Image (tube, rainbow, N blue to C red):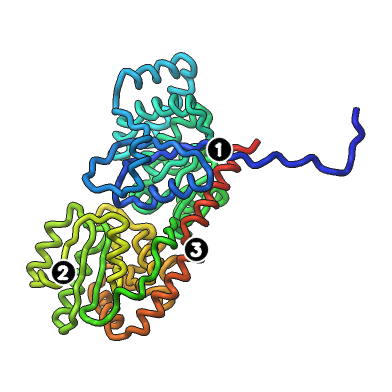
Amino acid sequence: MAAMTGTPPPSAPTRTPRVAYLVSRFPKLTETFILYEILAVQAQGVPVELYPLQRERTSVMHPEAAPLVAAAHYQPLLSLTILRAHLHYLRRKPRAYFAALRDLLRGTWGSRRYFFGALAFFPKAVRFARMMEAAGIEHIHAHFASHPAAAAFVIHRLTGIPYSFTAHGSDLHRDKHMLCAKTAEAAFVVTISEFNRRIFVAECGETARAKVEVLHCGVDSSAFQPDDGAARRGGPLQILCIGTLHEVKGQAHLIEACRLLAGRGLDFVCRFVGDGPDGPTLAGQAAHARLNGAVQFAGRKTRQEVIALLSEADVVVAPSVPSRDNRREGIPVVLMEAMGAGVPVVASDLSGIPELVEHEVSGLLVPPGDPAAIAAALERLAHDPALRARLGRDGRAKVLREFDLAANAARLVERFRKSVQP
């Protein structure tokens, strides 16, 4: 036997695992945070396979999504191949199969949306489990605490592959069925704000505190940069609001604020970028207030088109509110993009938003659902170019410090690596 020495053995080299991303829909134009996180993780040298639960049917797609769409593992809800995957686990791992199905249905019982979603996606999750084993997947990362995290839970039970998931906003706030079970079996959990982390602890107890890590969504600060040459040279105040036209985004309150500003004689143009179920109602509200010239609806835009619009904007507004069905924003990525581009922001004092927008430092905060406060903030910015410049400058500094995409992707990759270390 060789003599013992005081020198410790060399540590095993850090290994880069093969990672599967499990998402609800792809390619969803509004979920840029998922698309660009995957690209940033790949840039760190991590092989990523994409498993969407559903294919998003869209006529507008970010160009960077095209290669991922071409390689994504789309599956129908039911097929002969899916049935074969079920037979495989019924023969090889019947106890794990039935236990996973039992705990999935028991955990989602009482939530119509989650229970029927579990029934719909369980067949596909089993097929994904078989595919991931064959592909040599070593870690699964699901985006959203809802159906994707439930599918990752099932796949983990069948294969033993460790998983993690990111909780954002409404997926965490709206319905907490099975949240603690998903958290307990995950290798780790990511959430995008300290506000959300407190929700995990309140719902699942102190044991969740060590497992849940705050990792902000980030933006590419090299793509979103100040454009000092093209804009902000007088004329109407250029207001920009980006997001799905939906109650939770609070656009109706911004339109009411615009009505107040018009009544005070302020010269402005307010552009809404995006589409959604509330589009006709919001257009009707603007028409009724006789704001047709001042309020414009620009429809869906790609990232490059958004960057161009930001270069022309004087202020970006995110007037988020809790919806009647308990949806709630996390930290809107559009605020990070605007601040990265050096554009001052006005946002609701809600959820994790104050972790990005520090009032009077990196932006202005207003009470949710308060058109008068939104109008006052916009009027103040319209008459104070120096304030706009300072908030834009300090907002970009905040993004560079805490919300940079590459830096946060590197932290996530490190967690992936730790999950596969012996």
Secondary structure under tag 1 reads loop
| Residue count near mark 1 (Cα–Cα under 10 Å), binned few <14, some 14–19, many ≥20 | many
Amino acid type for the residue under numbered disc 3: Glu
Residue 87, compared with residue 265, is above or below; it is above
- Residue 91: horizontal and vertical position, in percent? 46, 14
Q: Is residue 102 visible?
A: no
- The answer to which of marks 3 and 1 sits earlier in the sequence is 1
Return the residue found at the far front. Answer: 229
Q: How far apart are marks 3 and 1 (CA)?
A: 26 Å
Q: What residue type is labelled 2?
A: Val
Could you tell me residue 210's position as x and y percent?
A: 57, 50
The residues tagged by marks 2 and 1 sit, at their Cα atoms, a distance apart of: 49 Å
Q: Classify the position of the C terminus by image quarter.
A: top right
Q: Which mark is residue 402?
A: 3
Earlier residue among tags 3 and 2:
2
Q: Where is the N terminus found, in terms of image quarters? A: top right
Report the residue marked by disc 1.
17
Can residue 50 be seen here? The reply is yes
Between 153 and 60, the one nearer to me in the picture? 60
Residue nearer the viewer, 307 or 179: 307
Tell me the SS state at disc 2.
strand
Q: Which residue is rendered at x = 43% and y = 58% of the image?
A: 220
- Whether tag 3 and tag 1 are in contact, CB under 8 A, the answer is no
